Image (cartoon, grey):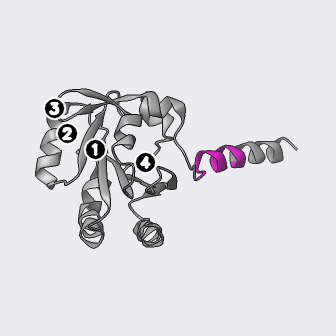
Amino acid sequence: MKKIALLIIVFATFSCSQAQKTEFSKKALAETLLATDGSQIKFKDILKNQKGKTTVIEVWASWCGDCVKAMPKLKELQANNPDVSFVFLSMDKTADKWKAGIEKHELKGAQFMANDGMKGIFGTAIDLDWIPRYIIIDKTGKIVLYRAIETDFEQINAALKQLQ
């Protein structure tokens, strides 16, 4: 009986953490991120700037091997979706490494960095458990794909196609 109860708890926990949400938590929206000019901006204001645009958010880091490996697919995604806005949220530990990563990988789009890494307040607020992580937001600001990773490009492409 204890094993069954434990399995149910594990399943419920995993299911909830992998759920496809349609909006960000108040905690995530209130969190500030570092802009490339050194200023701090609330996540809700980053999203406000995307209103009226289909947006792909990529959560990444320059030290992340899977992120680097996914860059060609990301660039292909950008090339195939010129009307889609891209926002990059870095989980780098220092601004220098983050900015060097932007330059090295020639990332095109809005660039921000979490102030406290993957396991910090912002990462926790967006249920971050893996990078690269992709979130797609429609023109109204609703999340249409909350959790996709580097192996989910078919799912990402399908979601973007539905939004056209």
CB atoms at circles 3 and 4 under 8 Å apart? no
How far across and down, in percent of the image, does residue 102 sit? 17, 47
Secondary structure beneath disc 3? loop
Image quadrant where one finds the C terminus: bottom left
Q: CA distance from mark 3 to mark 2?
A: 12 Å
The amino acid on which the numbered mark 1 sits, given as a three-letter code, is: Ala
CB atoms at circles 1 and 3 under 8 Å apart? no
Q: Which residues are magenta?
A: 11-19
| 46 on left or right of 24 | left
The amino acid on which the numbered mark 3 sits, given as a three-letter code, is: Asp
Q: Disc 2 designates what residue?
A: 98
Q: Disc 1 designates what residue?
A: 61
Q: Disc 4 designates what residue?
A: 130
Q: CA distance from mark 1 to mark 3?
A: 18 Å
- For the residue pair 56 and 8, the one nearer the viewer reads as 56
Numbered disc in front, either 1 or 3: 3
Q: Disc 3 designates what residue?
A: 37
Secondary structure beneath disc 4? loop
- For the residue pair 80 and 51, the one nearer the viewer reads as 51
**Sequence-earlier tag: 4 or 2:** 2
**Sequence-earlier tag: 4 or 1:** 1
CB atoms at circles 2 and 1 under 8 Å apart? yes
- For the residue pair 50 and 22, the one nearer the viewer reads as 50
Residue 14 belongs to magenta span? yes
The amino acid on which the numbered mark 2 sits, given as a three-letter code, is: Trp
How far across and down, in percent of the image, does residue 48 sit? 38, 41
Q: Is residue 75 above or below residue 119?
A: below
Q: CA distance from mark 4 to mark 1?
A: 11 Å
The amino acid on which the numbered mark 4 sits, given as a three-letter code, is: Trp
Badge 3 density bin: few <14, some 14–19, many ≥20, Cα 10 Å: few
**Sequence-earlier tag: 3 or 4:** 3
From the image, give the main secondary structure of the stretch colored magenta. helix
